[in-house]
Amino acid sequence: MQLTDYTGTFSDGLFPYLWWIIPLAAAAYLSKSMLLKHFFERFAVNTQAQCRLDAEHYHEFRNLDIRSNGRHEQIDYVYVSRFGIFVVAAPGCQGRISGDSGGAFWREEYHKHKTDFPNPLLKNQMYIQALAKQLELSPRMFYSVVAVTGNCQFQSVMPDNVLDVADFADYIAQYGEEVLDDLEVARIKSALEVNEFDVVFSRTGFDKRAWES
């Protein structure tokens, strides 16, 4: 019995028309991996917050949408409470992380791959300035927190507000001095509700307050 060899037929006839499936499949795989990575990063933050931050006292805003220096920006998390407003960046990192509080970029080294990414402390400072202006509050009412998700090790000394995601909620909870009253908290919540990502992008027209710089 003679077997038919279709190899030449595929390479000569079908491959020129189907080659695009390979990069498309690779892109779909990478996209799925990134979505899963993002899901687990946020799941870690959400779990810690729900377990250690009382929702009656800490009002959470996720993916808060703001305009800073004329650019569209998103803040990972903001927690509003009588004890202050906590701006939380949640970068997902793997391997060794090096950087300092004032440098424009930090570096991630993982399996011989080196990647520079914007310093989350500096980005938080930018967000705090924008929120303080919009809410007409002193920047002293805000606290910057970087909750690092993923399996990583810091290669340089980091400030106390840069910590593992498992510790970030306890770090926030340590602030016990009331700096805002209930009326101010309610006003801030009302103002920030128009900035939430899902709210802003579900509208056909943007709310002016959400985009004032």
Image (cartoon, helix red, strand yellow):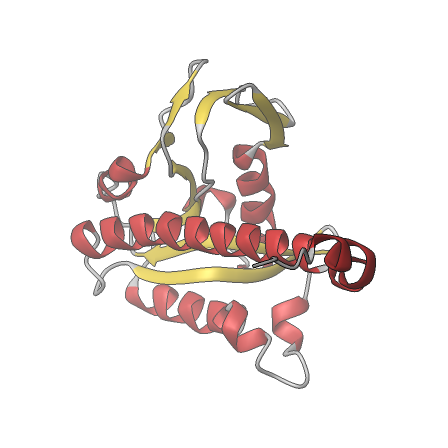
On the picture, is 182 further left or further right than 207?
Answer: left
Q: Quadrant of the C terminus?
A: bottom right
- Residue at (68, 53) in percent of width and height: 23
The number of numbered badges drawn on the structure is 0
Asked whether, in this view, residue 142 is left or right of residue 176, the answer is: right
Question: Which residue is depicted at the point 48% across and 50% down?
Answer: 33
Q: What residue is drawn where x is 62% and y is 54%?
A: 27
Classify residue 87 as left or right of residue 28: left
| Residue at the outermost front position | 1
In terms of image quadrants, where is residue 22? Answer: bottom right
Q: Classify the position of the N terminus by image quarter.
A: bottom right
Which one is in front, 34 or 82? 34
Q: Toward the viewer: 85 or 36? A: 36
Is residue 154 depicted above or below 55 in this figure? above
Q: Where 169 sits versus 185, above or below?
A: above
- Residue 105: image quadrant is top right
**Which residue extends farthest top?**
156
Residue 85 % position (x, y): 39, 51
- 136 and 89: which one is in front? 89
Q: Nearer the viewer, residue 211 or 34?
A: 34
Q: What x and y, as percent, mark residue 70? A: 76, 55
Residue furthest toward the bottom? 204
Q: Examine the rendering and report whether any part of residue 131 can be seen.
A: no
Residue drawn where x is 61% and y is 28% of the image: 115
Q: Can I make out residue 73 in this image? A: yes
On the image, the x and y values in percent for residue 16 come to 82, 59
Q: Is residue 23 above or below residue 147?
A: below
Q: Position of residue 147 (x, y in %)?
A: 38, 39
